[in-house]
Amino acid sequence: MLKNKIQINSSIIRRRIPEVIISLARLLFLIIVGYIVLYPILYMFVSAIKDRNALLDMEHIWVPVSFSFNAFSEAFELMNFGNALKQTLLVQVLSAAIEVFVCSFIAYGFARFKFKGKPIFTFLLILSLLIPIQMYTLSMSINFRNLHIFNTPFVYWLPSLFGVGIRSGMMIFVYQQFFIGLPKELEDAAYIDGAGPVKTYFSIALPSSSVVITTVAVLSFVWHWNEYHLATLSFLSEDAPLSMTMNFLEVYLQQIGIYKGWPEYSTLVSAACLMFIVIPLVLYMIFQRKFVRSIDRVGITG
C-alpha cells in the first residue's frame, strides 16, 4: 500500500515538473518584458529625484545617495503647468470628447444606410487614414485665418464637430466595423415601434456601443493629449497646451541658462516628462481592464 502511494506521488511529481518549468519560464519572460517596458519610466523617476551631487556620482545610478523633489516644482513653474493643463483640458480633451460622439454618429450612417456616392466617401475615409496632417496643415491654417478663428480653441473644436479632427478616419472605421456586426433585428424592432433613424441611433445603437466607445475614447484621449503639431503652428500661441510646452522644453531651459549635457538638464527634463505622462498613465490604469476587453471584442489588430 505504501509502495503504491509512493509510486502515485512520484508520477504526480513527474507530471508537475514540466508545468512548474513552463510557469517559471513564463514568469521570467514577463519579468524581462516588464523591465523593458518600465525601464524608461524608472530611469526618468530616478533621474528626476537626484540632486546635483547624486547626478555626478557614477557609482550609484539606480539608488541615489542623496535625492530631492525640487525638480518637480521647478519644472512645474518652468512649464506653467497649471495654465497648460487647463488649456489642454479645455481644448484638446474637450475636442477628443466631441470627436468620440460625432465619429460614432457618422460611422452609424456608413454602416447602416445606402446613399449615392457611398463608395467614393468610403474611399475618402480610407484615404484620410493614409495622409499625414503635415501635408494639409498649410491649407488648414489659411482656412482658419479666413474664418477668423485662427489662434482660438475652435481650430480644435471645429474639425472634431464635423468629424475631420485628429485621426477621425480611424475612429469612424472602428465604429463602422462594430455597427456592421450589431444585430439589425434590434433596429427593426425600433422601426416597427415608430422610431426614426436618429431615435434608433440614440435608443439602440449608442447604448449598445459602450464597448467600442471605451476603445475609441481612450485612443482619442491619448492622441489629443500628445498632439502638438497644430499648436506648434501658432494655432494656440498665447496659451500653449502641455504637448506644446513639452515640445519647446529645451528652448525654455536655454532661456534660464540650462543647456543639454548639464546635470540639471536631465533632472528637469525627466521631471517634466513624468508630470506630462502621469494623467494618461493613471487614466489607463483605471480603464485598463475594460480597455483590453473592449479591444478584444471590437477586433482591433495590428
Image (spheres, helix red, strand yellow):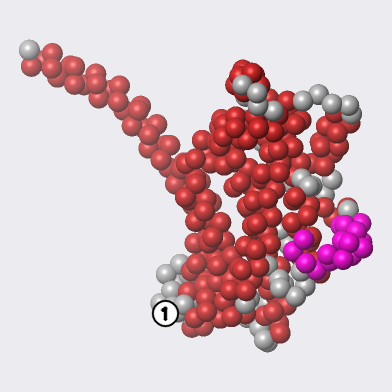
Quarter of the figure that contains the C terminus: top right
For disc 1, the marked residue is 66
**Residue 249 found in image quarter:** bottom right
Left or right placement of residue 296 versus residue 194 in this view? left
| Residue 10 image position (x, y, % from top left) | 21, 21
| Residue 272 image position (x, y, % from top left) | 59, 71
The residue at 52%/53% (across/down) is 283
- Of all residues shown, which one is farthest toward the front? 194
Compared with 298, 131 (above or below) is below
**Residue 112 found in image quarter:** top right
Q: Which residues are magenta?
A: 137-154
| Residue 121 image position (x, y, % from top left) | 86, 33
Quarter of the figure that contains the N terminus: top left
Residue 146 lies in magenta, yes or no? yes
Front residue of 23/228: it is 228
The residue at 76%/30% (across/down) is 110
Is the stretch drawn in magenta largely helix, strand or loop?
Answer: helix
Amino acid on which the number 1 mark rests in the picture: Ser
